[in-house]
Image (cartoon, rainbow, N blue to C red):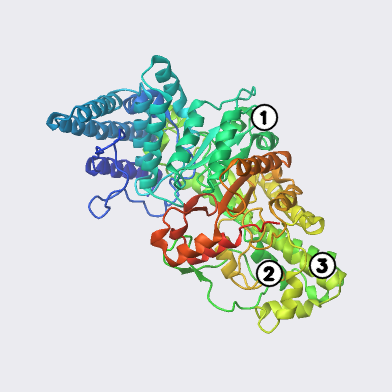
Amino acid sequence: MDSIETTRFLKQDMLRFLKEAPVVIPKEGTIAGFTLFDPEKICPPTLPRDMHLYDNLHFSMGTTFLSYGFAGVAERAKNAMKENLPKERYENLCAIAEVYQGICEFVKKHAEEALRLLEITKENEECERLSNMHRDLRQIALGKPESLHQAVQAYYFAWKLRGILNTSTMGRLDQYLYPFYEADIANGTETPESVLELLCELWELANQSGSGDTLMNVMLGGQTPEGKDLTNDLSLLMLQATRIVAKAEPHVNYRYHKGCRKDFLEEAAKVQLLGVAQATMYNDEVLIPALIEAGIPKEHAYNYTNDGCTEIIIDQKSTIFFDKFDIVKCFELAFFNGNPPPLPGKAEVGYWNKYLPAGEWTTTLETGFVSGDMTKMTTFEECYEAFKVQFRYQMMRVLNGLIENYKRICRENVAPALLNGSFEETLSTGMDCHRDGLPVQCLTMFAGSIPTVADCLYAIRETVFEKKLLTMEEIQTAVAANFEGCEVIRQQLLHAPKFGNDIDSVDFLAADIANLFCDLVKEAGKAHGIVIWPALLGYLFVQEAHFTGATPDGRRWKDPIAEHYSPTPGRAVNGPTAVMCSCGKASLKRAFGTAPVQISLSRSVLKQDEQGLTVIKSLTDAAVEKEFVMLNIGIYDVDVMKKAQEHPEQYEDIIVRVWGYSARFIDLSSEMQEHVMARVIANG
């Protein structure tokens, strides 16, 4: 199926869905539209074969429909079709015009249903609610949004129709909606209290649409290239809505800079103190200069947001494509000179939640590459160099694969008309946001779990070369046996310094590996004439712990490995300040694709009071001072979590951070539950 055929197929599929899709006028509230529906009764749009990334839902869609309305987008596409265009672009515009007109008809059906319900109701309050809904729905069916309610309604329709059975990132929602808010407050049609109620309703609908790895990230605040603070009253209200609703969705983040409003930062700290791992802080002070230094134009660098996880993208100006690097597995390959021993069992584990069946996972790295026999090496420097040889070889393979896959997507993939029509660039030209691209390319390589590798290397350095407690052969034999019958050796390895305790020797080793990763990413990008965004991010850390055997840090097979640039769970024993110091020794800003640091604290020592708020603010200030890219804080009660494992029905309100999102603790797989509990930092 070529691109023109695919465009037509996607168009007809969406038009068919719009005719079949459920019309939902809520019994309460003011936002119409489905949250979930039964796919057995209504067939959702299908994916053409081999077109699985036609929209990976990780990047924020455009907002032309807020500027022009759905009908206005259709009209603009029709006008652009009058130009002398290549066939592909003509077909894209034709699809945009027809799909957006189909959305108008879909919205019109909702307006008609609201009118039907209005005509049969006899309650005054219900009459007013339905009358207002009919007015708003009719307006966005025929024209462009003129009020905040109408803008929220239009956004909700577009966002739901983009994902249908899934969900997608929401981007800089406070910036999209603020002009409508400002006008409504000025003319007296809305108050902050009524807007807060509307936002809480939108947040509840997000939770009804799904929970967990939903990609529903919202970024709040920011600044202009001239340094003007873009934090506004709507930004503040969205944080307040997050605190009131206190659920997993959406995943709310905020941008810190020196000119931020104090009341905004105060509210962000209060949300963090809830303990549900919301209000993740992104640091403008390091991210924006790093993006500009990497070649991202200044006006786009100031417009960054995060994607459906924690990766940096440019709002409405970039898509994103990424791949991961299994760095702990890479160390294992180096440790055994390319051929690690068989695993003690199957690497069988679920993805992240208990509802998905467990599967057998494996690495994309290549076995067999000889990087040096560590048992024959006489210095730690030789061992470290052997790791770097293996690292370079495997990294270049994965990076070349990333670039080739990205080029294939640019050649072959076709974005759906709803998505293409949401961007100014594609609407006016008929370009495809994947094949022709948006203004900024966002091609990202992940490497999380570096701290675990540093722990392994330093354990070898101390026990073999410095204290001469063990030989390399003894460690290899013990690791290959998963430490069965080798507990004394395991304890010696466990007692070696670990990342996260403010110990320079191991912390600077981790920092050096992070630098090497960023160097290799930059080198590969330069060779191909493209910027690749390095990210110290890991999302399959549970899976990697299962397809990697035991390691020389004393970790047994399946025991947790580190996520992102955070300590290996259970290894940070000197408190959160020590963790911050360890992380701060790396030049995290080099990883401008993202460099998450997650701090998981115990509720037993951090109460929801003024003292707790002071601790949260202090941690954030320290993260800014140490030039972190981002900081996420979760606060958990491990004893309560253990009870939730036994009686999940009694603990449905426990929300925890997974990787780039939050989820209900009881929904997690048992392996992920254990990982989350293990990473809670000792009090120190």
Question: Mark 2 falls on what kind of element?
Answer: helix
Q: Residue placed at 47% from the left, 40% from the top?
A: 242
Label whose residue precedes the other's in the sequence (2 or 1): 1
Q: CA distance from mark 3 to mark 2?
A: 18 Å
Q: Residue placed at 48% from the left, 60% from the top?
A: 352
Q: What number of labels is visible?
A: 3
- Dot 2 alpha-carbon crowd within 10 angstroms: few under 14, some 14 to 19, many 20 or more: many
Q: Which residue is mark 2?
A: 333
Q: Amino acid at mark 3?
A: Arg
> Which of the two residues, 640 or 246, is positioned nearer the viewer here?
640
Disc 1 + disc 3, Cβ < 8 Å: no
Q: Residue placed at 70% from the left, 53% from the top?
A: 579
Which of discs 1 and 3 lies nearer the camera? The answer is 1
Left or right of 129: which side holds 188? right
- Dot 3 alpha-carbon crowd within 10 angstroms: few under 14, some 14 to 19, many 20 or more: many
Label whose residue precedes the other's in the sequence (1 or 3): 1
> Which of the two residues, 592 or 322, is positioned nearer the viewer here?
592
Rendered image: mark on residue 258 = 1
Q: Is residue 296 visible?
A: yes
